[in-house]
Image (cartoon, rainbow, N blue to C red):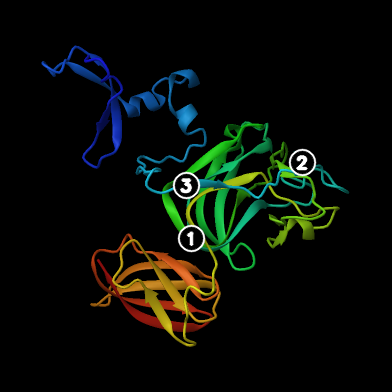
Amino acid sequence: TQGGSSGGGLFDASGRLIGGLSGGSATCANPVSDYFFRLNKAWNYYPEPEKQLAAWLAPVESNAMAIDGFDYYSETVKRYSNFTPSDEVGLFNLQGGSGYYSGHNSRGDRAFAEHFGFFSKATLHGFYILPASTAALQTYNVNIKVWGGTNAPEVVLWSMNNVDARALRINREYVVMLDSPLALNGNIWVGVELQYPSDGEDFALYQTAFRTEGPDNAWVRGADNIWRKLSDTGSGAGSASFMIDVLLSGVELIDTSDVIIDKGNFRISPNPARGTIDLYIYDLSGTARVDAFTLSGKLASSKNVMLNNGRGIMDISGLAPGVYIIRVEIEGKKYTGKLSVI
């Protein structure tokens, strides 16, 4: 083919990459007889890892059929970590029991998550996980999740369930990219949820050694289904972080001076809007149920939205242009307002 053109992309009607130029006899003067490879064939047509893309680009299979691209040059995406240069990282055995502080143990701890926040707003694109120990069973699954909440993980914002733990090999950092960026605010927790089969339990994350001072970001959900900071679980635990980092853009920390909300008022901003909106309800925090109705009374959307210090972010990208009635329910109270989507 014409020199310099090999590897040129082949795109579908939606602008998604579906293949690439692999060879041919075309030239600029005679642009025919070029041949393209198909991405869906190169993905996993051959079972050997060295002959497929899936093993390298998606070691944790999400079964996604298509992913929209993101222009990393138009908006800066940064990696955020709670680790400090002085931290020692390792796998630490549970004192007074068996197993690990950061994974399967005799206490039956069920989930392990790293806390990030407090954000005024941010967009989550993905995160990194570094396992220190993984299951040796033939079949064993873990769930990977993102939670939101006010004072502890309360609601699941994103999840990838039944991930084969054998794909999460030790001492290898895995990046999990969301199919679509997730708009968020307030606190988030990113981590794993475990099962307890009859034998062979052996999954754990790397963590910092317990700190005498500094960040205290590691959270654990015990056998009683209650979330606690790892430092509050006893058995010699202290302040720590799990080895989980996040990829964020558009990060704004909470600044109570940026919006003045009159007591008792409910406000939607911007309005008209597209993409996302901010919901303001004076002095309320927690999970709100937000419904969007057409003017004819038809339910167009229903979501759970986290409010922190009177502010929450709602994704409205699924709403067609038009006028909607927004109804918010939180702590037994209802608020309504009109929204114009453009």
Q: Amino acid at mark 1?
A: Leu
State the image quarter where residue 42 is shown. Answer: top left
158 vs 177: above or below = below
Residue at the image point whose x is 52% and y is 36% from the top? 60
Q: Amino acid at mark 2?
A: Glu
State the image quarter where residue 98 is shown. Answer: top right
Residue at the image point whose x is 72% and y is 61% from the top? 228
Residue 145, given in percent of the width and then of the height, sits at 55, 51
Whether tag 1 and tag 3 are in contact, CB under 8 A, the answer is no
Label 3 SS: strand
Q: Amino acid at mark 3?
A: Val
Density class for disc 2 (Cα within 10 Å; few <14, some 14-19, many ≥20) is few
Residue at the image point whose x is 16% and y is 15% from the top? 27
Quick one: label 3 or label 2, which is nearer the N terminus?
3
Residue 150, given in percent of the width and then of the height, sits at 60, 68
Q: Is residue 306 left or right of residue 82?
A: left
Q: For mark 1, what is the residue? A: 184
Residue at the image point whose x is 42% and y is 70% from the top? 278
Q: For mark 2, what is the residue? A: 88
**What whole-number distance in Å separates the C-alpha atoms at marks 1 and 3?**
15 Å
290 vs 315: above or below = below
Q: For mark 3, what is the residue? A: 77
State the image quarter where residue 213 is shown. Answer: bottom right
Residue 338, given in percent of the width and then of the height, sits at 31, 79
